[in-house]
Structures are given as structure tokens and as C-alpha cells.
Amino acid sequence: MNTRTVLCIDEEGAVADTAEALSADSTLDPITRTTVAEASEAITEEPVACVVTEYDLADGSGLDVVDTLRAERPQTPCVLYTDVRPGEVDTASFEELIVEYVSKDLPDATEQLAFVVEDLIDHSAQVGFLRPDNEESRLEALSAYDVDELPIEDSFDRLTDLIASHFDIEVAFVGLIEEDEEDFLACSGADWDSLTREDTICTHSMLQEDVMVVEDVQADSRFSENEQLRTLGIRSYAGANMTTPDGHVIGQVCALDNEPRTFSEPERADLQRFAETAMEILELRQSLLSARTETEVDV
């Protein structure tokens, strides 16, 4: 039976009680931290399936933990487990995170907490994917590119071959993120046409400003149960945004391997440059197509 890691944050004495309550569920594996700083480090480094946090912490508040969770793992659910009343909590700060409130003053509060945590983990696993706040305008920006009419296949084939060789990886691809799927314009090392957005890591990567790296897909709670990724043999991932001149992320340039691996800061910078090159190719081809179309209309 697979266990799910739950990060518990509270003061020294109380956090042990929270962890003990969750340990009664054999599917949950609680780890404990006592400060915002320690919790933020764990969220970044650990494959956490859920976060349980007190509101008042020694070096900040549970909202600071939520901020880190939003930035690093926006689909990971969070439980605010506290005796602070809801009216005193700035719930607007939670935004898109799956956040539940459980009062420590409730009868059988610890039993209630375990139930809520398990239910939230199961629910979050069924959530297809998060969409950017500007999804509608992003899709409009994507539709402005006449991809089917652009002579880009050879250019992108060469680019993905170069990426695969540069990083010494199994697969490199250029993908455009449509409403429900990611379409691959070129894919070196594999014969893939598309993936649903529920299955692709890119739907997470596109929400981040910087290059997103998953060193070991099987050790990351967001993707470890994704059968499609397992079937395709994707064990490590790095993805960089293809961003239009007006700031819309329409696609990703990605480097994948069939074994865990790291990407150094210079390598991440290189991947971002490859993504910028892919966007420049797309922009150039679209400009040439638009100019040709205008010329034909004038004639």
C-alpha cells in the first residue's frame, strides 16, 4: 500500500499530537516542522501530498505556508488546523489552493482531521488540472498562430534534436498547450502527437515563471500515480515556457529522461533560451505568413 506524506506544522508540543493522530491512518505518513522556514524548505524538497498547518507560528503564520505552497505545489491540498476563529483568518489569501478549516476545539478534532486530510488527498488526485487566471485570453493568443499553415516542422525537428543532444537526454519536445490537450509540434526521441492536459506535467510548469524541474517523477506526489507518465517512461522532466510578446504562455519546450536527473542553473538557463528560440521561430513564420496573405489580398 502506498503511503502519502503529510506535512504537519505547529509548535513543538502540539505538532507531535497532530502527527500521532494522522499516523493512525496506515495510508498517511506525517512529517513534522515547527516554523514557516522549515515548512517552506520541506514543501520545496519533499513529495508532500497534503499540508496541515497551525495559523499562529513562531516566525509567521499559516498564510505564509500557504504562499509557499501556492508557488511551489499549487495543486497540493492544505488544512488549516487551529483554534483561531475563521473570522480572524484572511481566507481571501488562499485563492486557488484547496484549503480546509478544521477547528481544534471540535469534539473528536483529531479524528475529524484525519478524515479531512484523506478526503482532500483523494479529491485533489481527481482534479484534472489548474488553469491560468488568463486562460481565455491565453487561448485567444494561441489561436492567432496558424500552426497548420506554418512551415515550422523541419525547424522544430532540428531544434528538438539539438536540445536532446545538448542535454544528453532521451526525449525533447516543443508543445503547444491547447484547451484540453498539449499538441507536440516536434518530438525528438519519441513518436508522440499529444497528451491530455491532465496527464502532462506541462500544465503545472506553465504556471511557473521559471524553468520547472522534476528530478524524479516517481518521487513527486503530483505525478507518482500518473499511469500515462509511467507508461511513457518519463522519469525526469524540465520545462520552459514559450511566452508570446504580450506575455501569454502558449507552450513549453521540454527535456525528459528515463531516469532521475538534476538540471543545474546554467542548464535551466539554456533550456529557457531554447524555449525563446522556439517562440522566435513561431513568431517569424507567423509574420511571414501574415505578410504573404496581405500581399495576396492586395493583388
Image (cartoon, grey):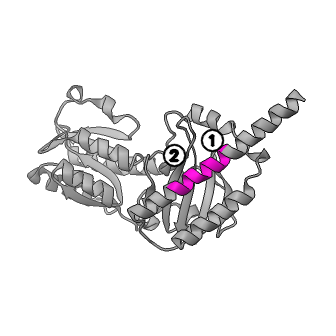
Mark 2, secondary structure of its residue: loop
Q: Position of residue 98 (x, y in %)?
A: 38, 41
Q: Position of residue 199 (x, y in %)?
A: 56, 55
What residue would you read off at disc 1?
179
Instruction: Name the kind of residue labelled 1 in the image.
Output: Glu
Q: Pick the residue in front: 147 or 3.
A: 147
Q: Position of residue 11 (x, y in %)?
A: 12, 49
Is residue 280 found inside the magenta-colored segment of the image? yes
Please report the residue visible at 79 percent of the width from the left and 45 percent of the height from the top.
Answer: 149
Q: Is residue 14 above or below residue 295?
A: below
Per the picture, the main secondary structure of the magenta-coloured stretch is helix
Please report the residue visible at 20 percent of the width from the left and 51 percent of the height from the top.
Answer: 37
What residue would you read off at disc 2?
129
Q: What crowding class fits label 1: few (fewer than 14 Cα within 10 Å), some (14-19), or many (20 or more)? A: some
Q: Is residue 116 above or below residue 166?
A: above
The answer for how far apart the CA atoms under marks 2 and 1 are is: 11 Å
Please report the residue visible at 73 percent of the width from the left and 45 percent of the height from the top.
Answer: 147
Q: Is residue 71 above or below residue 212?
A: above
Relative side of 117 to 255, left or right: left
Quarter containing the N terminus: bottom left
Q: Which residues are magenta?
A: 273-283
Quarter containing the C terminus: top right
Instruction: State the residue lying farthest toward the right.
Output: 299
Q: Is residue 226 above or below residue 61?
A: below
Instruction: State the residue lying farthest toward the left.
Output: 13
Is residue 44 found inside the magenta-colored segment of the image? no
Disc marking residue 170: none
